[in-house]
Image: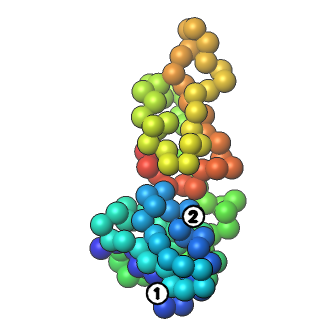
């Protein structure tokens, strides 16, 4: 069961902007809709919702989290293999090759925490 937007939605559109799979649609000042076939249950929409009107897959309302407190992607430099899958999958282009890359140290990546929404697709 995907996430669901309740009737208390104010139609601000934040959920649509933050959704990594572009599965939320609607018109300003009207209730937005999450399309069940594309929802990946990441809760990004709910964590950014200013009125906490989005239920998770268990039917429980997900509380808003301050953007600075939302867990962001972290790269463990010792375990990173340089496959770059995380770069390809990131819908917000916040993962890029590390500036530390040199001929003997290729393929490591870093995360731009300012643009990361914490969707966990890169995991």
Q: Tell me where residue 12 appears, x and y as whole percent.
A: 62, 78
Side of 91 where 36 appears, left or right? left
Q: Earlier in the sequence, mark 1 or mark 2?
A: 1
Residue 56 visible to the viewer: no
Q: In which quarter of the view is residue 104 placed?
A: top right
Side of 25 where 102 appears, left or right? right
Residue density around tag 1, few if under 14, some if 14–19, many if 20 or more, within 10 Å: some
Side of 12 where 56 appears, left or right? left
Asked if labels 2 and 1 touch by Cβ distance under 8 angstroms, the answer is no
Residue 19 visible to the viewer: yes
Q: Nearer the viewer, mark 1 or mark 2?
A: 2
Q: Tell me where residue 93 appears, x and y as whole percent.
A: 56, 42
Task: Measure how far apart labels 1 and 2 are at the Cα level.
Answer: 18 Å
Q: Tell me which residue sits at (54%, 90%) in the image.
A: 8
Out of 75 and 98, give the one closest to the viewer.
Answer: 98
Side of 43 where 47 appears, left or right? right
Out of 13 and 89, give the one closest to the viewer.
Answer: 13
Give the quadrant of the C terminus.
top left
- Residue under circle 2? 17
Q: Tell me which residue sits at (69%, 49%) in the image.
A: 114
Say which mark, if any, is on residue 64: none
Q: Tell me where residue 33 appears, x and y as whole percent.
A: 44, 78
Give the quadrant of the N terminus.
bottom left
Say which mark, if any, is on residue 6: 1
Location of residue 37 with respect to 53 vertically, above or below: above
Q: In which quarter of the view is residue 58 placed?
A: bottom left
Location of residue 76 with respect to 56 vertically, above or below: above
Q: Secondary structure at mark 2?
A: helix
Colouring method of the image: rainbow
Location of residue 100 with respect to 68 vertically, above or below: above
């Amino acid at each position: 069961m995907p996430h669901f937007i309740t009737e208390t939605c104010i139609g601000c559109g934040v959920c649509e902007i933050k959704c990594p799979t572009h599965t939320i649609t609607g018109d300003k000042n009207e209730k937005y809709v999450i399309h069940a076939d594309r929802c990946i249950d990441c809760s990004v929409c709910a964590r950014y919702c200013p009125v906490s009107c989005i239920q998770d897959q268990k039917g429980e309302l997900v509380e808003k989290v301050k953007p600075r407190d939302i867990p962001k992607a972290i790269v463990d430099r010792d375990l990173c293999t340089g496959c770059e899958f995380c770069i390809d999958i990131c819908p917000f282009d916040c993962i890029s090759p590390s500036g530390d890359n040199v001929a003997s140290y290729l393929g490591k990546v870093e995360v731009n925490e300012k643009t990361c929404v914490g969707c966990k697709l890169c995991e």
